[in-house]
Image (cartoon, grey):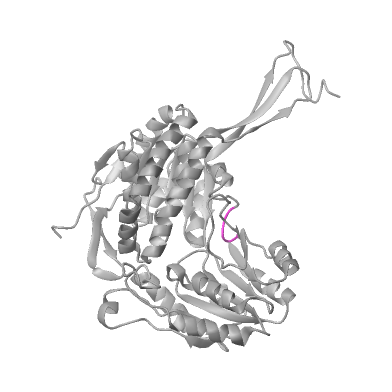
Amino acid sequence: MADVTEYENYINGEWVKCRSGETFENRNPAQTDEIVGIFQQSRAADVNDAVAAAKEAYKKWRLVPAPKRAEILLRITDRLVKEKERCSRDMTREMGKILKETRGDVQEAIDLGYYMVGEGRRQLGYTTPSELPNKFNMCIRQPLGVCGLITPWNFPMAIPSWKMMPALVLGNTIVIKPATDTPLSVYNYVKIFEEEGLPRGVVNIVTGSGRNVGEPLMTHKDVSCVSFTGSTEVGRRISEACAADFKHCHLEMGGKNCIFIMNDADIDLAVEGALWGAFGTTGQRCTASSRLIVHRDVIKEFTDKLVARANGLKVGNGLDETVDMGPAINESQINTVLNYIDIGKNEDGAKLLCGGERLTGGEYDKGFFTMPTVFGDVTSDMRIFQEEIFGSVTSITECASFEDGIGLCNNTAYGLSASIYTRDVNKAFAAMRDVYTGIFYVNAPTIGAEVHLPFGGVKDTGNGHREAGIAGLDVFSEWKSVYIDFSGKMQKAQIDNN
């Protein structure tokens, strides 16, 4: 314990312990006897301090010209490029996913940073002709104030960047609560903000539980916007809490995403995509390919090849460059996954094709490891077809036709991501039109979003807002319409113009 670093909250430009003095451990899910760090178990009083600092800092930060704000964000992003490997290795230690993926996570934060730096000189409004003479019309964006950000553990630097960078370039200030399983990645990110000269109070980090930090943050009267990524259940509670004060509320929640494999698909390519979509990040992605809907003409070939490939994946500590899949994030999550595997085993008709067990023995006993698991003969009324598992489990469902497959794709409460594998351009465009999701891929899995397009979903996945791209600015700003009358006389729109 003497060699384990204790990390503090960052409030008003200073690193401080929480008021209660309580802490919690951050452990490596691949090797639970390793304590990655000790973090502050903060409470409402610490949230109040952070919000007060952000509120005060907003008075000056909103008046800094947007291109000047962007110059600071550019320095931060350039620095993150230099720190990429260190941050990636820390992320693997605290989150578990393999180094190849954590490097991608940090790279996404870099890409998003550079994209939003450009918004320092854009943030485009527009002008329109007036219906009256000698009058000029335009609209502009204005910031909101203090933004409360609640981020998840599966992308512990990429997703904070999706929220922080647009909020900051627009002139808002921030209080961020990182996931209790992955606070070090957000600490590493915020530390760079501090060292590259971001003014005091503009960004504040408060660690702790959802109950003790998240709830006081989302209900605080001085917080103008809450952006949350996590479960649909928690998102619903946040939506209700924000509604009382009419706060801006952005919710990115669950998914039950499908890959639709047609009978004219490149089967080897589809297997490759399904393998990556289902088991990348150990299936712990809101965009994971947890439903594979396969045309009956090719289902046997596809199934045989997928099961063989899944059985060949190497599971282990993500710091080992030869490993294909890391652990579940914690004991609770692996128990959830194992419970769904049992549900699948007991559902009438479903067949366990591979996996289905917790890995034990040797180094596996120190972590939360499961086998890559595939179920076959799954029908749309089964729980493993309908419910988000968030683990290394996928299912194969047969379809009889293109129209049947489209219906199965849409047969879920969620609507985040979907894809189709086909060589028929007409079917590709029809599926693109008819599958009701926020993201769609052709001849690629349901994961792989790029930062310059909007990210988010429909139905129980989200509440209409998007992250990344130009759309990422919308939740953190308000539109203001501006009318300038230089006629020198009183003019009445709609009245003087009839």
Q: Position of residue 419 (x, y in %)?
A: 62, 67
Q: Residue at x 23, y 56 (%)?
A: 38
Residue 438 on image: x %, y %: 61, 58
Any magenta on residue 461? yes
Residue 270 vs residue 21: left or right?
right
**Dividing the picture into quarters, in which one does residue 196 lie?**
top left
In the rendered image, residue 56 lying in the magenta stretch gets the answer no
Residue 437 found in image quarter: bottom right
Relative image position of residue 164 (x, y in whole percent): 44, 44
* Residue in the picture at 61% in, 66% down: 418
Q: Is 376 situated left or right of 203 in this image?
A: right
Q: Tell me, yes or no, if residue 47 can be seen here.
A: no
In the foreground, 388 or 293: 293
Check the picture and name the quadrant holding the N terminus: bottom left
- Residue 319, placed above or below residue 230: below
Q: Note whether residue 271 is visible.
A: yes
Location of residue 64 with respect to 169 vertically, above or below: above
Q: Main secondary structure of the magenta part?
A: loop
- In the image, the segment drawn in magenta is 459-463
Pick the front one: 448 or 176: 448
For the point 26% across and 69% down, the residue is: 32
